[in-house]
Image: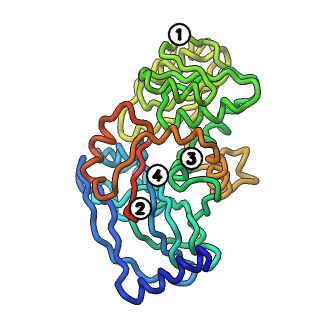
């Protein structure tokens, strides 16, 4: 009996002997979260029953949710695709889940899929919302797909090309994925700027140069900013050469941003643009869909080097207690993934 047949039979037996029950992480108050039990319905036609193996925590966006920094002006834009509840609290939030299909249309059963779903151990999802994980991409690494999408979108927005001098300010998971992609453009010189020396080995493994001084490169063709700080944005401006493009990838939520736009910004005729993964760049919209971009992001995760980005695991049962440390501290960590039972 093949793997899909075994998984299908297992699901049939389980449905005959016990009701479907799951647990999900809910953000319930500023810097507080808990696990709540949920009844999971039988899958209807065109739905998948997915048992989660891994999910990833978005330290940028989920930190804002964790703190309750969701101003009414942008709450609609902050919603994750399968969020339940309304901001600020309580909300079931998250968008980096990978699991195995236990029931649904035959082509999916027994396969690993990536879903933009909150942290939950068992859930239903429309089949067209699940993207199969390539066979040569481990489920654990596949949790980086949403972040890789963001990095790919930023690269498109930047217009960076072969031979460019590129600076990435902020060596978090998004900045490091942008570094990884840019370092694979022929002839590029790529620099990652960060104050944390623990990021240097990853930057160098990706084929780029680590710097901690913004004055080390001041004639870049393209600069990405990902640190979500005013100081980082100032440093990014200082790295730009004449007529350079600065791509702002950070999401600040409700936080005010202070930036000087006199002097070099004006006389160098710099371009400051926003990159946001919710929309495809205009140059791609005639041909690309969000699904095609996500499928491409999963294909880009085939490289074993990218495992270096996952620096910590936490058990799902321990997640509520671990969130404060993950989101408010843990400066040496890059990406944290959640490990589910079974």
Q: Where in the figure is residue 89, as x and y percent of width and height?
A: 28, 57
Q: Where in the figure is residue 253, as x and y percent of width and height?
A: 39, 41
Q: CA distance from mark 4 to mark 1?
A: 36 Å
Residue at horizontal 59 percent and vertical 12 percent from the top = 218
Question: Mark 4 — residue?
Answer: 77
Does 61 sit left or right of 146 as displayed?
Answer: left
Residue in the foreground of this view, choosing between 139 and 151: 139
Task: Mark 3 and mark 4 in contact? Answer it, CB < 8 Å.
Answer: no
Select label 3 or label 4 by which is in front.
Answer: 3
Q: How is the image coloured?
A: rainbow
Q: CA distance from mark 3 to mark 4?
A: 11 Å
Select label 4 or label 2 by which is in front.
Answer: 2
Question: Mark 2 — residue?
Answer: 83
Does 52 sit left or right of 142 as displayed?
Answer: left
Residue at the farthest front position: 1
Question: Mark 1 — residue?
Answer: 215
Counting residues from the start of the chain, the first of labels 4 and 2 encountered is 4
Q: CA distance from mark 2 to mark 1?
A: 42 Å
Mark sitting on residue 277: 3
């Amino acid at each position: 009996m093949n793997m899909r047949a075994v998984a299908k039979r297992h699901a049939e037996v389980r449905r005959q002997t016990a009701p479907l029950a799951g647990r999900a992480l809910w953000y319930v108050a500023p810097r507080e979260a808990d696990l709540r039990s949920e009844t999971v319905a039988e899958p209807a036609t065109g739905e998948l029953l997915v048992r989660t193996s891994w999910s990833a925590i978005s330290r940028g966006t989920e930190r804002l949710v964790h703190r309750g920094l969701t101003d009414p002006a942008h709450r609609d834009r902050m919603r994750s695709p399968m969020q339940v509840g309304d901001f600020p609290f309580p909300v079931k939030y998250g968008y980096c889940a990978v699991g195995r299909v236990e029931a649904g249309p035959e082509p999916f059963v027994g396969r690993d899929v990536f879903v933009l779903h909150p942290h939950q151990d068992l859930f239903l999802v429309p089949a067209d919302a699940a993207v199969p994980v390539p066979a040569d991409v481990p489920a654990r690494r596949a949790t980086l797909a949403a972040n890789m999408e963001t990095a790919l979108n930023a690269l498109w927005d930047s217009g960076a090309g072969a031979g460019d001098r590129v600076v990435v300010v902020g060596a978090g998971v998004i900045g490091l994925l942008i570094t990884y992609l840019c370092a694979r453009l022929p002839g590029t010189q790529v620099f990652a700027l960060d104050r944390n020396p623990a990021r240097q080995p990853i930057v160098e493994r990706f084929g780029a140069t680590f710097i901690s001084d913004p004055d080390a490169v001041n004639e870049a063709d393209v600069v990405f900013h990902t640190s979500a700080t005013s100081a980082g944005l100032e440093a990014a401006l200082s790295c730009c050469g004449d007529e350079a493009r600065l791509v702002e990838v950070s999401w600040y939520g409700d936080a005010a941003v202070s930036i000087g736009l006199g002097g070099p910004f004006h006389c160098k005729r710099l371009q400051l643009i926003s990159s946001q993964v919710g929309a495809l760049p205009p140059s791609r919209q005639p041909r690309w869909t969000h699904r095609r971009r996500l499928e491409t992001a999963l294909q880009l995760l085939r490289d074993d080097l990218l495992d270096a980005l996952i620096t910590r695991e936490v058990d799902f049962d321990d997640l509520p207690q671990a969130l404060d440390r993950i989101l408010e501290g843990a400066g040496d960590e890059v990406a944290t993934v959640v490990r589910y039972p079974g």
